Structures are given as structure tokens and as C-alpha cells.
Image (cartoon, rainbow, N blue to C red):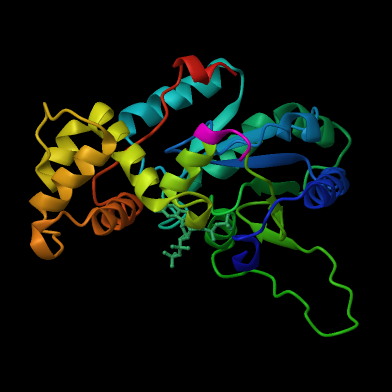
Amino acid sequence: MEDMKDIQWFPGHMAKTRRMITKSLSLVDAVAELLDARVPLSSRNPELGRMTGRKPRLVILNKADMADPNLTAQWLQYFRKQGAAVITADSKSGKGLKQFEPALRTLLQPQLAAYAAKGMKGRPIRVMILGIPNVGKSSLINRLAGGKRAKAEDRAGVTRTQQWIRVANGVELLDTPGVLWPKLDDQEVACRLAFTGAIRDSILDQEALAAKLLRLLHEEYPQALLERYKIPLDAEGSGFDLLEMMARNRSMLLSGGVANIERAAITLLDEFRAAKLGRITLERPYAEEATP
Ligand code: G4P
């Protein structure tokens, strides 16, 4: 999905996506909604529920390898309390994906029983993967398919039809995932998605973004900042003050001993995205903004 990463979401795109999803919905038994376990709320598309209606939905908290395990456990509980089927996954290594098929079978138990009653026991379970750009849709499909991924037809004049990729035990995935738009009109959401690298940096000023992230990390994960950047646990000041501290402690200096804030900002964002600060989750369930 390389080409989709930097897409600008205009109303026309959204309408096209809605149509594509609605069309594909009739072909599948369930949808799998991929969320980023580090920002489960911000990586949700607010319209998905409306688009998929009563189609059974499996929530996958992806990138769980980079998220705080304690908070991931709380998020699992949060989604389960809402009645959702939910699993965690690391689509890079494949960890957690063994839960995919059993979770689908549990979710679709009534439908599978009805098929069995009609003598359609071997009928495959068909699923469509959905999620915002960069959440790991392609990685998940490739991992589940284990290299068996169908080759897309790209000869001129040949209409590309959607294909099914057979994954574990009678489960088939639609080879084209639904790319949902993030809710960028919400500044807080846009910032959290930018922290994780899900949206383009140019949308927001790097230094302001890094300052905001550093402030947030200092509140939630002060120990990580102490260990990596020697920022004292009781440090005070704005995010920019903390960036300056980080620059000095890492000897990022310009001539005249001025702290190189720009370099510190880029380093922080890079290192956070590469999980060098440890496993961090930026959203807590049951916080004020977590109200569904
Ligand atoms: P998309 O189709 O939804 O747009 O996402 P895609 O699979 O392209 O994944 C986006 C980036 O996230 C990729 O990194 C991918 O490797 C990484 N990723 C996906 N799932 C996981 C996961 O569960 N854990 C971790 N740690 N990373 C994940 P990239 O930097 O674009 O490429 P690369 O590092 O794989 O080369």
C-alpha cells in the first residue's frame, strides 16, 4: 500500500472508499478492523461502524510489540466490555496471529452453525481487512498468507478483479484491504497519529510536535526519558524546555553552545517511532476522551 501512505483525503476519496467498502461487504462474512495498539482511539475511523452496519467485526490491536503491555491488557478489557471481539497482534513478526482464526470462528459461531445446518460445512469464512494508512494492513495480509499472496494482474487492459487469499484453515481474505481515512480534523488525534508516524510529518511542525510528545512522555513515562535522555524525573518546564534539556544531555549543540532543538526533535521522533524508548502507549482507556 505504498502509494496510499501519503494520500490526501478529500471528500471524493472518502466517497470512493465508502463505495468500495460497501460493495465488498456483501462478499464477506466479517471485517477485521486494524488499530494501532499505541493509539487505539486515534487510529479508529469514526465512520466504520456506520459503514459496516451489522457485519461481524474483529478488532485487531496491531503493533502490540511496541505498545505498553499493561495498557494493552486494559484496552482488551475495554473492547471486550463493549461486546467486541478483539485480539492483539504483531504483524511484523507474526506473533499473536494464531488467535486470528479461532477468534473469527468464535465471532461467527451463529453463522457457521447456520451454514452447517444447511449442509455448507466446508464453506470458507471470508474476511476483509480495514484500517487507516500505515496501521499494518499489508503486513498482516502477508503474514497470514505466509508468502502465498496472490499476484495482482497489472497488464494493460486486464481488469483487475478482487482475489481471495487463502489463509489458515478455511479462512479467505480479500486481497485488497480497505484503506480508511484518519480523523485529521481533530487536532489531538492528528498529533497522536503524527507521533507514531502514521501521517506525514509535513502536516505539523516537527519541533512543536516533538515538544508536545516529550511533554506527554514526561507525564506518562518519565523513567524512559531519564534512562535515554537523562531528563530528571522532576524536570519542569514546557516541552521545548525539555527538548533543550535533551539536546544538551545528548551534546546536540550548535556553535556557541546553543542547544540544537531541531536535531533533538528529529531524534526524539525517530527514536520513539523505532520503539527505542521502550513499549509505550499514548492513550488510556476510560480516560475522559476514551468515551466511545
Ligand atoms: P498499511 O498496509 O496499513 O499501510 O501498513 P504496512 O503493512 O505497510 O505497515 C506500515 C509499517 O508498519 C511498516 O513499516 C511495517 O513493517 C510496520 N508494521 C506493521 N505491523 C507491525 C507490527 O505489528 N509491529 C511493528 N513493530 N511494525 C509493524 P515500514 O517502516 O514502512 O517498513 P519496514 O520497517 O517493514 O521496512
Please tell me which residue is depicted at 81% across the width and 63% down the height of the picture.
Answer: 162
242 or 213: which is nearer to us?
242
Residue 11 vs residue 103, the one in the foreground: 11
Position of 93 relative to 36 (above/below): below
Magenta span: predominant SS is: loop
Quadrant the N terminus occupies: bottom right
Determine if residue 103 is in view.
Answer: yes
**Could you tell whether 60 is left or right of 196 in the image?**
right
For residue 35, which quarter of the picture?
top right
Q: Is residue 29 left or right of residue 204?
A: right
Report x, y in % for residue 42. Answer: 54, 35
Q: Tell me the magenta residue range.
A: 184-188
Residue 282 picture location, percent across and down: 39, 33
Depth check: give the residue in front, 211 or 137: 211
Question: Residue 3's x, y, as percent?
Answer: 64, 67
Check if residue 185 falls in the magenta segment: yes
Name the quarter where the C terminus is drawn: top right
